[in-house]
Image (spheres, rainbow, N blue to C red):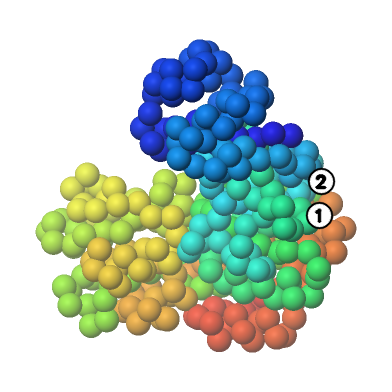
Amino acid sequence: MLTNRVRQVRQRLQMSQADVAKRIGISRQALRYIETGETVPNTFTALRLAQVFSVRVEDLFQTLDEEAVRVAAAADEDVSEGDRVFLSDTGNRLAAHRVHPIATSTRHGHADAVVHEVLGNQQVRIQASPYRTLEPGVVIAGCDPGLQLLSDTAANTTKQQVMWRNADNRRAKHLLTEGLVHAAAVHIPVTLSAAADADSSFERHDGIRKFHFASWQLGWVVKQGNPKGFQEASNFLTGRFRLANRHSGAGTRKLLEQLLADAGVDPAQVPGYDFELGSHLEVALAVENGAADVGIALSSVAGPLRLQFMPIHTERCELWVPSQHLRQDSVQAMVDALVSDPFRWELAAVGDYDVANTGLEL
């Protein structure tokens, strides 16, 4: 299979199709067919294109093994051409997950492939690395950083990659429903029932096995010493406090909306309400570096960053795994890691996690 980067290079050089076609002596339509891969250029045309762009022919055209280019489901709504991705295969669908510098982990710290083309309908064509065997791994979706420790622990006991990708409650359950991940970590408030993010369809699903991951506290995070004196949601009425928020769909966002409503605060009047971040860690980092004065995050991310933490409520996190996936050695290794004493000890040491019931099947 011949793949080309003619369009990408032309656009990077800010050259029009008409200009390039004229300079190499072909029609604009012929150039369009080359860019879309419908036509393979002859040697002379390929050389002229390279000369016009001042690049090598091999920078424009590559011959790929058919196995190296495959279609996969896009597990991220904002996937773009050129994104680095790691892959999961649940037996039903091959899925491509965008590598995020903060909110994902891979066993070896690199990607399986890059997005070669976005096809629409949440489908992408991926180009696998020619230097690695394409072996999709097991993927856990959730928003707690402790999942990275779980994936690393499981990966050390199996030959297959076990990876964590960040996803809020709603997104994690969606990815599990669509068969794009092997497990979802779902956190459920236990001391503030009105903010619960339960999903009755999963509660009734006999095919889902649920395991207790850990319990923790969720609360306000501010800089050490609380220099601006933030205490509660009603303080936003003063307009003095900049917020680091989470995306719609996050359990933390629902909690914030409830707290603001109870305090009679209009979200539109909160500075930074539209400053939406994708994870607890990103919220804590925004407070640490001064981009925000306050946010809601897990106590486990506040401690390592030396932020002051003011608890709001306690949550428990459950690991939801479809029964059929437990037949895979790597998925079973993940569950085995969850119940192991070494993992429980290290998770408790990482942050403010209650691991008394970790690994217990619910």
Q: Would residue 75 appear left or right of 307 to someone viewing this image?
A: right
Residue 342 horizontal/vertical position (percent)? 70, 86
Looking at the image, residue 86 lies above or below residue 163: above
- Report helix, strand or loop for mark 1: helix
- Report helix, strand or loop for mark 2: loop
Residue bearing the label numbered 2 = 91
Pointers 2 and 1 in contact (C-beta within 8 Å): yes
The amino acid on which the numbered mark 2 sits, given as a three-letter code, is Gly
Between 32 and 177, the one nearer to me in the picture: 32
Residue 314 horizontal/vertical position (percent)? 48, 70
Where is residue 229, by image quadrant? bottom left
Between 110 and 172, the one nearer to me in the picture: 110
Where is residue 39, by image quadrant? top right
Where is residue 333, by image quadrant? bottom right
Q: Residues within 10 Å of mark 1 (few under 14, many from 20)?
A: some
Residue at 42 percent across and 46 percent down: it is 248
Q: Which mark is residue 325?
A: 1
Q: Mark 2 and mark 1: span between their CA atoms?
A: 9 Å
Residue 105 horizontal/vertical position (percent)? 59, 65
Q: How many marks?
A: 2
Q: Residues within 10 Å of mark 2 (few under 14, many from 20)?
A: few
Residue at 24 percent across and 53 percent down: it is 272
Q: Would residue 55 appear left or right of 157 to someone viewing this image?
A: left
Residue at 70 percent across and 76 percent down: it is 153
Which quadrant of the figure contains the C terminus? bottom right
Between 99 and 331, the one nearer to me in the picture: 99
The amino acid on which the numbered mark 1 sits, given as a three-letter code, is His
